[in-house]
Image: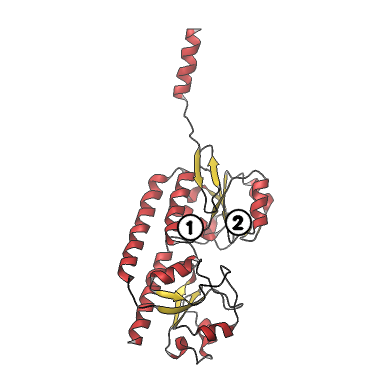
């Protein structure tokens, strides 16, 4: 009897013990895995990019359209778009973790994923600090904290440096254009608005209730921002500018303060958002200098 007891204890000591992995997602839900995720489906381009940043690009088995950064992401299998996925395809990929975008993926889609027994983490960065926190939590879910923690720390250091550099700047009123047709902007809760604030800007539509409200041109004319900033998808695209030049009564147009920033820098909640922040802060400094 003693022999068998010793044998069982020895086998237990030799067997690898898998600790439960647990984090809280951006919507306050606890996400638990019996072991670090090995097969991950990403339902947003920013999520795909974050996963590569924490060293688990090789474990992504499915992504949605426009998951194109880093370049290796372009070769990953597609499961649909952010608002319409092939559920059978996702199930066939046997993911142990699905990472969804809380404000981008339809609630019904997220509910269906959960009803099918899939483990879902909801990503919804609403502050710049949330980007670093997402990196850390995704790293924990994948068991790559050793990679994720220095990346998150580097992001926080760069963010702190930008805050110090642009603290106390004179405010500049800003209209941010997400889309031209329909004309779409962001409210004060959106991460882009937090970048504008970081640079000493004031989002003229911060008080609107919707996260990404649609507007008519008259609303922009009334707000009369000092700068109009657009997220552009094609380098050198001037078509968006041409659309504003007819409105010569706008201060931003009269003073030639039409600013283009690569859309992926500001409209994806990733490390690159600080690249966009640096460009925007420098551009708003030029607006201030012209007003002196």
Which residue bears the numbered disc 1? 49
Q: Secondary structure at mark 2?
A: loop
Image quarter of the C terminus: bottom left
Q: Is residue 23 above or below residue 214?
A: above
* Front-most of residues 83 and 128: 128
**Residue 291 occupies quadrant:** bottom left
Q: Estimate the x, y position of residue 132 in percent, counting from the top left.
A: 42, 55
Q: Secondary structure at mark 1?
A: helix
- Density class for disc 1 (Cα within 10 Å; few <14, some 14-19, many ≥20) is many
Q: Disc count in the image?
A: 2
Camera sees residue 152: yes
Marks 2 and 1, Cα distance to the nearest angstrom?
Answer: 15 Å
Q: Estimate the x, y position of residue 105 in percent, counting from the top left.
A: 61, 59
Which residue bears the numbered disc 2? 78
Q: Estimate the x, y position of residue 90 in percent, counting from the top left.
A: 64, 50
Q: Is residue 28 above or below residue 1?
A: below
Q: Residue at x 45, y 57 (%)?
A: 130
* Front-most of residues 270 and 67: 270
Q: Estimate the x, y position of residue 135 in percent, counting from the top left.
A: 44, 53
Q: Is residue 8 left or right of residue 159?
A: right
* Front-most of residues 291 and 43: 291
Q: Is residue 8 left or right of residue 62?
A: left
């Amino acid at each position: 009897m003693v022999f068998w007891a010793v044998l069982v204890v020895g086998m237990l000591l030799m067997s690898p013990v898998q600790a439960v992995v647990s984090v809280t997602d951006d919507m306050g839900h606890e996400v638990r895995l019996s072991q670090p995720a090995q097969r991950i489906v990403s339902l947003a381009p920013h999520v795909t990019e974050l996963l590569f940043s924490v060293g688990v690009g090789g474990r992504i088995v499915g992504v949605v359209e426009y998951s194109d950064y880093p370049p290796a992401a372009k070769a990953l299998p597609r499961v649909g778009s952010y608002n319409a996925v092939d559920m059978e395809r996702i199930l066939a990929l046997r993911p142990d973790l699905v990472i969804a975008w809380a404000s981008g993926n339809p609630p019904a889609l997220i509910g269906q994923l959960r009803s099918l027994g899939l483990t879902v983490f909801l990503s919804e960065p609403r502050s710049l600090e949330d980007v670093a926190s997402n990196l850390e939590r995704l790293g924990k879910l994948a068991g790559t904290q050793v990679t994720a923690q220095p990346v998150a720390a580097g992001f926080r250091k760069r963010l702190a440096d930008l805050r110090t550099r642009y603290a106390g700047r004179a405010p500049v009123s800003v209209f941010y254009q997400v889309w031209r047709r329909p004309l779409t902007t962001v409210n004060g809760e959106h991460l882009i608005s937090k970048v504008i604030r970081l640079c000493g800007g004031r989002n003229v539509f911060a008080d609107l209730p919707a996260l990404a409200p649609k507007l008519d041109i008259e609303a922009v004319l009334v707000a009369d921002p000092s700068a109009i900033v657009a997220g552009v998808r094609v380098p050198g695209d001037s078509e968006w500018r041409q659309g504003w030049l007819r409105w010569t009564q706008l201060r931003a147009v009269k003073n030639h303060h039409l600013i283009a920033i690569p859309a992926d820098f500001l409209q994806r909640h990733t490390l690159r958002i600080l690249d966009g922040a640096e460009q925007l802060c420098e551009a708003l400094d030029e607006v201030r200098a012209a007003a002196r």
